[in-house]
Amino acid sequence: MKNKQLPLFPAAPQQPQDITRKTPIGATLALFARHLTQEGKSEHTVKAFMADMELLLERTGGSTPVSDYTTGALNDFLAWMEFERGIPCSRKTYARRVTTLKVFFRWLYTLSAVPHDPAKAVLQRSGPAPLSAALNPAQVQAALLAARRMKRDEDHDYRPELILQLLLQTGIKKSETERLLLTDIDRTNPQSPTLFVRQKAKDIYKERRIALEAALPALIDAYSAQYQPATTLFTCTTRNLEYILTEVGEQAAIPFKLSFEVLRWTSAVRDWRAGMEEEAIREKLGLSKISWYETGQKIRRLVDAQIHAETLSPE
C-alpha cells in the first residue's frame, strides 16, 4: 500500500462561503488572494498583502482557527513584528500590515465566518510621520561640487553630476529613473527642455512632463559621448546609481546617506522655497491628492526646519 501525502488542510474551503469559525487561517489565504484580485487590487498589492498574512501565520501558526484571533492577539503580533522579530519595520510597512489585517478580518466578518471583526479596534500609528532628510542649499552646492570632481579612470566622469542634477531638477523616483529613455528628453525648445515621465499604476502607465534647466541637455550629451547609451538613459542598474549617490554624499560630507529618496524630498523642498504652487509640486511628483495630504505636510515641515536653521546660523 502506497503512502499518500496528506494535504496540509484536508478540509480546505473551496468557496468563501465555506469558511467557518473553525477554518484554519492558512486554509483561507488562497481565497483571500482571489478576493483581492476580484476587488481590483494590483498584482503588487496582492503579493504584499499575502506576504503580510504569511508573516502572521509565521507567528501564530497556519492551523489556528480564524475565530481564535482577538484584538489583543493581533496587537501582540504587531508588537512582536515591530520590537521582537529582529528585522527593521518602517512606518510605511507597519501601516500596510495593519491595513492587511483590517482588510482580511473585515472580509471574514462580511462572510459571517467570524462573530466579530477583531482588527477593527487595532489602531494605526498615531502622530506625524518621521521627518525625512533633505539637502539644504549649502549641501546641494557641496554635493554638486563633489559630483563634478569625480573621475572615470583619468577622465572627468559625467554620470555622477547627471544623476544628481536630474533628481534635483525632477524629483523622480528610482523606478522612474530606471525606465528613462533617451527619447524621453524633449529638446524641441532648447531654452525649455522637458522630461517625459511614464508612471505605472495598476499596470497602467500615466504620463507627465517635467521642466528641465536649459543646461541639462548639454550635460546629457557629454554623458552620452562617454557612456554611449543605446536606448535607456542610464547604462547601469539603479543599484549602481545608488552607490554613486552614496559616494557623492560622502565626498560632500553630507551627514546622512544621499539617496533617491533624499533627492526627491530635496527637489520638492527647493520647488516649495522657490514659490511653486502646491498643486504644481504634487503633479510634478506624480502623487494623488490623497497621497499629497501627508507628503505636503512633510514638505512644509522640512521647509520650516531649513528656514529655522538658517535664521540661527551666523552670517
Image: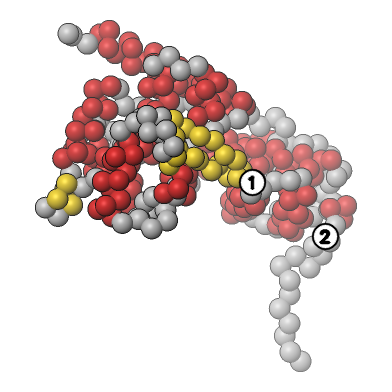
Return the residue nearer the eye: 154 or 123: 154
Q: CA distance from mark 2 to mark 1?
A: 34 Å
Q: Amino acid at mark 2?
A: Pro
Return the residue nearer the eye: 198 or 172: 198
Q: Identify the mark at residue 204; answer none if there is no mark.
A: 1
Q: Residue at (84%, 61%) from the top-left corner? A: 14
Q: Secondary structure at mark 1?
A: strand
Packing grade of label 2 (10 A; few <14, some 14-19, many >=20) is: some
Q: Marks 2 and 1: which is nearer the front?
A: 1
Looking at the image, is 288 positioned above or below residue 81? above
Residue holding disc 2: 13
Q: Residue at (85%, 45%) from the top-left corner? A: 111
Looking at the image, is 220 positioned above or below residue 212? below
Which x, y percent locates residue 222? 26, 46
The reply, left or right, for residue 182 in relation to residue 94 is: left
Asked which quadrant contains residue 96, the reply is top right
Looking at the image, is 16 positioned above or below residue 10? above
Residue 94 seen: no
Packing grade of label 1 (10 A; few <14, some 14-19, many >=20) is: few
The reply, left or right, for residue 144 in relation to residue 65 is: left
